[in-house]
Image (spheres, grey):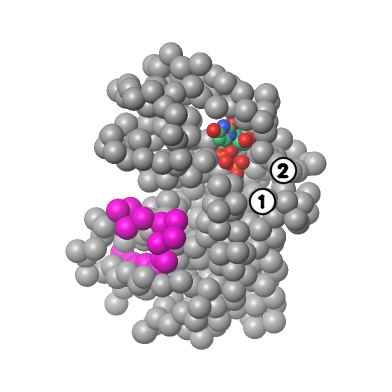
Amino acid sequence: MKKRVLITGAAGFLGSHLCDRFLAEGFHVIAMDNLITGDLKNIEHMFEREDFQFYHHDVTTFVHVPGTIDYILHFASPASPIDYLKIPIQTLKVGSLGTHNLLGLAKEKNARILIASTSEVYGDPLVHPQKETYYGNVNTIGPRGVYDEAKRFQESITMAYHRFHGLDTRIARIFNTYGPRMRLNDGRVIPAFIGQALRGEDLTVFGDGSQTRSFCYVDDQVDGLYKLLMSDYQLPVNIGNPNEISILDFAQEIIKLTQSNQKIIFKPLPKDDPMQRQPDITLARDILDWEPRVSRSEGMKKTYDYFSNLSEEELFKSEHKNFEKHIRK
Ligand code: UDP
């Protein structure tokens, strides 16, 4: 009998890659998504399989899954600053009510549950790099507060279920991750820059570009998450790539990668945009024997290949209205 895993947010970027990984590991995958930000095209290649099933369901309402469940991975949530502005209430609900429902289901099914938390629990961090012991610097009422606070609540209720009910829980603090199947127009910097380069638009750097991020390729991220789920460690663990770069330097890397001659233009920095972000992954290295393996140049090449194969219609539909009708390949 195959072990059965429930993955929420399964039609999203990370969720769909998790489905691929668990199928490859020999699990029966039960995928769930309400398709607000997810897209069925990310998982349609699995639909023919007998060891895969899909529920179109919103986890903020009661979650019922017949049969046994061995593992749950809760990855349902909007996850980009544009989404937090467009759907703030849903963002709060899926992190709070949705997590509560899934913890309840895990308790009922006696399943181990891994919760997708985030580097956003550190807010605009005053400690660098960020260790799991740092409590963070979050603006509760800013535009990102709906995501940050939902995720902080999610960690609290998960630990409460662990301590009070003895539930078998895992908490991953996920740092910026990229790769194929990101949404082209979710506003995140990697699809934004690649999309702009492919459309022949200027690259929009927010602020002066001195803010930093550390980008993890999706295969490394999924591997870290898999190892965390299979470990016996119950406290939060950072999963990300410590290789840090400023957004301005990153824009220049993209121009080289895409061999486009685009200019960089500067736009105002969004409110509460963290100035620096870099995971300290000492804990993950120690307890999971895990660290990222894919270099940024290798990962970005794969990601660029994915986006450059999108249809012209997909590339041009969007919030982007003022572009030159020109695709570079
Ligand atoms: N960013 C940018 N230009 C864009 C989109 C994003 O300069 O077109 C910046 C953004 O202000 C932030 C960084 O890139 O400093 C990463 O943004 P993203 O939304 O990808 O992730 P997050 O801020 O959640 O880490």
Image quadrant where one finds the C terminus:
top left
- Seen at 29% across and 70% down, the residue is 53
Circle 2: element type: loop
* 7 to the left or right of 286: left
- Seen at 54% across and 19% down, the residue is 264
- 299 w.r.t. 161: above or below: above
* Amino acid type of the residue tagged 1 in the rendering: Arg
* 48 to the left or right of 31: left
Spot the residue most to the left.
48
Q: Is residue 32 magenta?
A: yes
Spot the residue most to the top.
261
Labels 1 and 2 touching (C-beta < 8 A): yes
Q: Residues within 10 Å of mark 2 (few under 14, many from 20)?
A: some
Which residues lie in the magenta part? 26-43
Image quadrant where one finds the N terminus:
bottom left
Which numbered disc covers residue 144?
Answer: 1
Which of the marked residues, 1 or 2, is nearer the chain's N terminus? 1
* 270 to the left or right of 26: right
Q: Is residue 301 magenta?
A: no
Of the four image quadrants, the one with ligand 1 is: top right
- Seen at 38% across and 58% down, the residue is 11
* 181 to the left or right of 281: left
Question: Where is mark 2, residue-wise?
Answer: 272
Q: Nearer the viewer, residue 124 or 26?
A: 124
Residue 80: in sight, yes or no? Answer: yes
Q: Nearer the viewer, residue 135 or 286?
A: 135
Circle 1: element type: loop
- The spot of residue 192 in percent (x, y) is 48, 34
